[in-house]
Image (cartoon, rainbow, N blue to C red):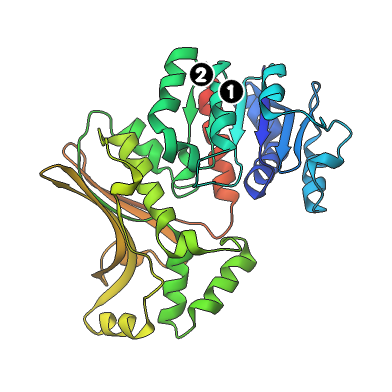
Amino acid sequence: MKVIKTVLFGLGTVNIGFLKILMSSHRQLIQEYSLSFKIIAVADSSGFAVCDHGFDFEALISLKMAKAKISSLKDFQAHITTENCINRIEGDLLIESSPGNLKDGNPGLSVSMLALQKGWSVVFANKAPLIFLFDRLHQLCSEYGGKVAYSSTVCGGLPVINVLKRDLKLASLIRLRGIFNATTNYILQELDKGGTMEDAIKEAQRLGAAEADPTHDIHGHDTANKLFIIMKSFTSYAGSISDIEVTGIQHVKREQLIEAKLRSKKIKLVASAEPNESGWKLCVKPTEVDADSFLATCEGWEMGIEINTDFYESIAMKNYEADPMGTSAAVLRDAIDLCLQK
């Protein structure tokens, strides 16, 4: 059996879900993959805790359920910097699930680069490092021998990245369209039913699907980030996130949804990639789609994507995800894949 010395950077809902799955699937992991994950360090906003013989999963879950911080653990490393902590740990895998910082990508970006420079592999649940330095992170893998995986950053449990990178080998993208943000899709559904945007946002926050500040979702930036990661993963796209045209749903009114319905249309927040003379036109905006189309069938907490390629023609897939468990499962999926490659 291969024991994977693992560092959890961030102990929010995604990594807590990851720990819950590890608890329930421990025997299956050993039987099917000969893998066991030992959590040797954890970090949250209060700092790092390190335990060479491994933390008890249930104790970490209980800690966060009690809304306590890592600093309350007896293994807490007071006054130690992230860099010093990573340098003193002999690990195999970093799971980067810290809150996304779209100003400079840190601390997730810096800790991921440190881990890769030590030859570790990194699973990203946080999109921000990929948005800032996608190419550099992959370059560090080539230089130091680690690997990265990030399927959970795009539509949670929906295996968009895996299908594109693994299953569509040698294919060239012709066009794609997708609904990548379930919160905005749910809000549009509630508006269509006669509700208000404010009430829909509150319900999304109550369910834990939307942040206290939902602007990132509502204004379309979360969708744009996912589109960027898809294009960097599956094409030779050399642009930046700022090259994507972004319009959110903040100004969509119920009257517009009703008018669209009279024309047998639905309004969705659609991410699209279309070829143009300079390469690609990438766009995120509220878009009318035919009521009987695939994207129109993505309702409420569903996300979906339509992919057109030269070899495989048209592929469409969607999932329903109203809580982070699918994202947590995708993190474990990535971790297993990376560990089996080494």
Residue 62: image x %, image y %? 82, 47
Q: Quarter of the image for the N terminus: give it.
A: top right
Tell which of 244 and 164 is nearer to you: 244
In terms of image quadrants, where is residue 98?
Answer: top right
The first of marks 2 and 1 along the sequence is 1
The residue lying at 35 percent from left, 66 percent from top is 297
**Residue 85: percent from the left, percent from the top?**
72, 24
In percent of width and height, residue 307 lies at 26, 47
User: In the structure shown, which secondary structural element does the residue marked by tag 1 occupy?
Assistant: helix
Can you tell which mark lies on residue 115? 1
Horizontal side of 14 relative to 288 (left or right) equals: right
Asked if 111 appears above or below 316 in the picture, the reply is above
Neighbour class for label 2 at 10 Å: few (<14), some, many (≥20)? many
The three-letter code of the residue at mark 1 reads Ala
Residue at mark 2: 146
Which residue is painted at 46% across and 39% down in the image? 151
